[in-house]
Image (cartoon, rainbow, N blue to C red):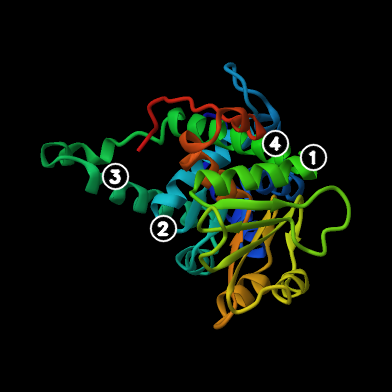
């Protein structure tokens, strides 16, 4: 436990964080969740302070507590997005006392840790240390990288974004026959096929949107009106899709539609990067950096 903060105080901060997560049931970026939490609570002088190696104590304290919560099965962390599980909601309701809430999270973390140890190590399970800084550093590094990619895509030239998506399709083995020039495009930005001459169905119709917010169901419905039964529609956005839009896409029986949000776009770009033409890799210039990740 960090000097200057009690288990009860840590539990209080964790419960307040869970309230933020409950209100954002689809998940929220870690940085936004921490900012919202900081706005809701009165930070102590100790929490407002900085560690000698850098970083505000408040952020580190909360991040340490979330490690216990994740291993307890109460939280999920994926690509910098934090969300609460059903078990987390149940625990929040079951343990209204902050100290009891955090003690249970720690108990479940220790239980998980014990399951990871070799049999000859289990005698020392009560001496398990608090989660070390390596995990927190890993999370913060990943979140910073994702934030920079997000900012890059949110500010990319819209026509460069079209070229980026077209280059990705070609790297995946599709044949792009048309990219919309500047001006009105009638709702279509890219046409592609499975073969070079465009003789093999389906015809692939792509709409590309540079957005910071979520694509709503009305926009998706408008795009679907352009998709025939023999077509495949792909909607690409640098933002995300509302739940209603996702449900509409899943419910299609005759018209085929695939949704690609920012994270999937980045994942595909990384997966097929080796297949990209060299001069097109700079449309989203990513460089991998490898280091030992925590468990």
Question: From this viewpoint, is residue 277 visible?
Answer: yes
Q: Give the mark nearer the N terminus: 4 vs 3.
A: 4
* Separation of residues labelled 4 and 3 (CA atoms): 31 Å
Say which residue label 4 marks. 44
Q: Nearer the viewer, mark 1 or mark 3?
A: 1
What SS does tag 3 mark? helix
Give the answer, above or below, for where 43 lies relative to 71: above
What SS does tag 4 mark? loop
- Residue 248 % position (x, y): 63, 77
Q: Give the mark nearer the N terminus: 1 vs 4.
A: 4
Q: Nearer the viewer, mark 1 or mark 4?
A: 1
* Quarter of the figure with the C terminus: top left
* Separation of residues labelled 2 and 4 (CA atoms): 29 Å
Query: Residue 113 got which mark?
Result: 3
- Residue 85 % position (x, y): 49, 63
Say which residue label 2 marks. 73
What SS does tag 1 mark? loop
Q: Are marks 3 and 2 in contact (CB under 8 Å)?
A: no
Say which residue label 1 marks. 157
What SS does tag 2 mark? loop
Q: Give the mark nearer the N terminus: 2 vs 4.
A: 4
Pick the residue in front: 142 or 239.
239
Q: Give the mark nearer the N terminus: 1 vs 3.
A: 3
* Separation of residues labelled 3 and 2 (CA atoms): 13 Å
The residue at the far top in this view is: 52
Q: Are marks 4 and 3 in contact (CB under 8 Å)?
A: no
Question: From this viewpoint, is residue 79 visible?
Answer: no
Residue plotted at (47% across, 56% down): 100
């Amino acid at each position: 436990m960090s000097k200057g903060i009690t288990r009860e105080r840590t539990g209080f901060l964790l419960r307040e964080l869970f309230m933020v997560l409950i209100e954002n049931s689809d998940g929220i970026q870690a940085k936004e969740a921490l900012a919202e939490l900081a706005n809701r609570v009165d930070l102590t002088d100790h929490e407002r302070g900085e560690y000698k190696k850098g970083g505000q104590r408040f952020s580190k304290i909360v991040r340490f507590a979330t490690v216990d919560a994740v291993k307890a099965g109460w939280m999920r962390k994926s690509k910098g997005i934090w969300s609460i599980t059903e078990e987390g909601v149940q625990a929040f309701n079951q343990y209204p006392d902050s100290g009891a809430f955090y003690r249970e999270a720690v108990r479940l973390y220790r239980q998980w840790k014990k399951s990871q140890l070799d049999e000859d190590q289990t005698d020392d399970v009560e001496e398990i240390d608090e989660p070390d800084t390596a995990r927190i550093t890993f999370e913060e590094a990943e979140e910073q990288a994702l934030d920079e990619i997000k900012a890059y895509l949110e500010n990319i030239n819209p026509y460069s974004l079209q070229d980026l998506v077209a280059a990705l399709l070609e790297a995946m083995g599709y044949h792009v026959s048309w990219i919309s020039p500047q001006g009105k495009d009638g709702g279509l930005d890219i046409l592609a096929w499975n073969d070079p001459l465009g003789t093999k169905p389906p015809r692939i119709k792509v709409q590309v949107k540079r957005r910071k917010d979520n694509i709503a169901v009305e926009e998706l419905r408008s795009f679907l009106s352009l998709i025939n039964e023999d077509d495949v529609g792909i909607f690409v956005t640098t933002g995300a899709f509302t739940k209603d839009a996702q449900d509409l896409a899943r419910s299609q029986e005759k018209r085929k539609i695939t949704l690609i949000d920012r994270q999937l776009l980045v994942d595909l770009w990384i997966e097929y990067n080796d297949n990209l033409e060299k001069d097109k890799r700079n449309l989203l210039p990513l460089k991998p950096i490898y280091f030992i990740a925590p468990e």
